[in-house]
Structures are given as C-alpha cells and as structure tokens.
Amino acid sequence: MSRYMDRFSIENKVCVVTGGGGLIGMKHTEAIMEGGGIAILLDVVPTGMERVKDEIRKEYGEDKIVESYVVDITDRNALEKIRDELLEKYGHIDVLINNAANNPKVESKSDNLKAMRFHDFPVELWNQDIAVGLTGAMLCAQVFGKVMEDQKSGVILNISSDYGLIAPDQRIYRKEGLPEEQQIIKPVSYSVVKHGIIGLTKYLAVYWADKGIRVNTLCPASLSNGQDEEFVSKISKLIPMGRMSKPDEYVCTVLYMISDATTYMTGSTVILDGGRTSW
Ligand SMILES: NC(=O)c1ccc[n+]([C@@H]2O[C@H](COP(=O)([O-])OP(=O)(O)OC[C@H]3O[C@@H](n4cnc5c(N)ncnc54)[C@H](O)[C@@H]3O)[C@@H](O)[C@H]2O)c1
C-alpha cells in the first residue's frame, strides 16, 4: 500500500509538448506515458514526431495516445486552432511543456553554431532564436494557459538549461589548430533565451498563483548525444560528477514536476547538471 505514489499519476491529462520531435521531446513524451497521460506533440518538423510516435508505440503499446501537430509555435493563430481542436476532442488541456528552442549542437554542426564571434552574430539569427525560445513559449503560455485559467488548474513546465544560470565556457567548443575565425562558439542568443525563460516562469508563477496554475523551470544540462571524445573530455572536467547526462535521467523529474507530486512548487527552478553550477 502506498499513500503517495498515486500523486505521480497524470491519468488522462492532456499534455502539450513543444519541440516534441527533438531529443528531449522524446523523453518528455516517455514521462507523460509513464504517468498515464495523453501526449500532444507540436513541432515545426514532422519527422522527429513520427519517430517519437513509433518508439512510444513499440515501448508502451498501440493503445497509448500520442498526437502530433506540425506547427510553428511563433504562429498564434495556428496555436489557437490546435487549442480549439484539443478542447473539442478532450474538453481540457492540463499540462504545457515549453521545450522548443533553437538548440545549437556541437554534434550536428547547427547553422547558428558556426564560426561566429559575438560581434559578427547576425541579428537575423538572434531574432529567430528569440522568436522560438521566448516568443513561442510566451504565445503557448497565453493560448494554452487561458484554458488552464478557465479550468482553474494546470501546470506549465518551461525548459531552460545550465546556460540559463551560467555563461557557456567557450573553451569546450574550441578545436585545436583551427584559426580563430573558424572556432565555434555557443551563441549569445542561447544564453539570453535560457535566462529569459526563467524570468517567464517567475512572472507567470506569481501571475497565476491564485488561479490553480503552477509554473516551474527545469534546467537540463550536458546531454550525451554522440559528441566527439575531445568535447566529452573537456565538458566532463567542468562537471563535479565527472560525466555528461543521459537523456533517460530527465524522465522521472519531468513526471514529478508535471504531476500532483509537486502541488506546492511554483516559480521554482530544478537543476539537473551533475553539480556544474555548484562550483
Ligand atoms: N540537448 C541538450 O544538451 C540540452 C541541454 C540543456 C537544455 N536543453 C534544452 O532542452 C530543450 C530541447 O532540446 P533538444 O536537445 O531536445 O533540442 P532539439 O533541437 O533536439 O529539439 C528542439 C525541437 O524544437 C523544434 N522547433 C524549433 N523551432 C520550432 C518552432 N518554431 N515551432 C515548433 N517547434 C520548433 C525543432 O524542430 C526540434 O525538433 C531546448 O529548450 C534546449 O534548450 C537541451
């Protein structure tokens, strides 16, 4: 007999995940499945969401509900259409995970992680990164949060990063022997988006504190995803636990934060970084 474990249940709760087709989107979806919820994935690219749906069917069975919508989260009208469809179908929307962001990755040599010293960083990329990571999150909170306000219940989980708390150590991205102008750096927009999302959390947590909506931030960090040995070795030295994280290590914390296991948590920042921001 357990007095508390059923608080982790999100049975039949409708959970919207932005950037649902990405690396961590898969893990958010697993958290939703573990809790018995319904996952609604939003992503501008369809392929990742199809992969997530296939994996979930294999892992959890055909009867589990994972729906996907191809949408740009900076388009408020498109978000409203999805909200209306979901309300028509399910009658409620309970959880929003604001996860989408342009996340420049060393292993995928993303466009906005090219040789880009701060003074050369193009304003076009800055605008795109802010649009997805901050404006998109704000619009989703407006559109889906309104439903939660009417229901007088809901949970919003904003995904930040250790780079929402500390500056990137650009030395870990450097490649020996490359001339200065070809060295890659983590762009300024990433820091600003990840710090900004913590501000959005605190603002909304207080704004909705008496409306039954909880808003919190999760800071994942240093996900292992096929990076080269040199990078892994450099970043591991910056982490007290001495290693990168595995994507699986986020699943239980996400379920904890979106379920009734955390009914008194709002405005908080939960950091999973192997201790990196502690020294
Ligand atoms: N991977 C890491 O090491 C790491 C570390 C810390 C924090 N994070 C954060 O976790 C979150 C997810 O990261 P990830 O590694 O899964 O990234 P990812 O790039 O794999 O996934 C992001 C997803 O967002 C989607 N997206 C981009 N623009 C969009 C738009 N306008 N509308 C809808 N969807 C859009 C992309 O298509 C992609 O599928 C991000 O907020 C990231 O900053 C990641």
Image: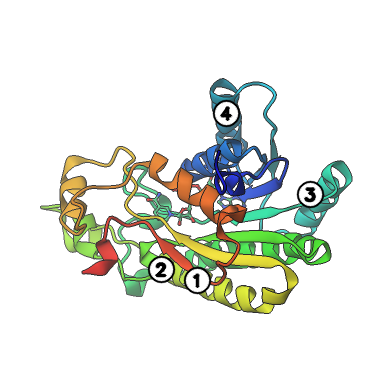
- Residue type at the position of mark 3: Ile
Mark closer to the observer (3, 1): 1
**Residue 56 — which label?**
4
Percent x, y for residue 118? Answer: 33, 72
Residue farthest along the front direction in this orientation: 1
Alpha carbon of mark 2 to alpha carbon of mark 1: how far?
A: 7 Å
Relative to 169, say whether 247 is above or below. Answer: above
The answer to whether the residues at label 1 and label 4 have Cβ atoms under 8 Å apart is no
How far is disc 4 from disc 2 in space, using C-alphas?
Answer: 30 Å
Classify residue 150 as left or right of residue 141. right
Q: Which mark is residue 198?
A: 1
Residue 41: horizontal and vertical position, in percent? Answer: 65, 43
Question: Which residue in the structure is indicated by mark 2?
Answer: 164
Amino acid at circle 4: Ile
Q: Nearer the viewer, residue 143 or 91?
A: 91
In this rendering, position of residue 31 left or right of residue 88: left
* Residue shown at the point (61%, 63%) measured from the top left: 137
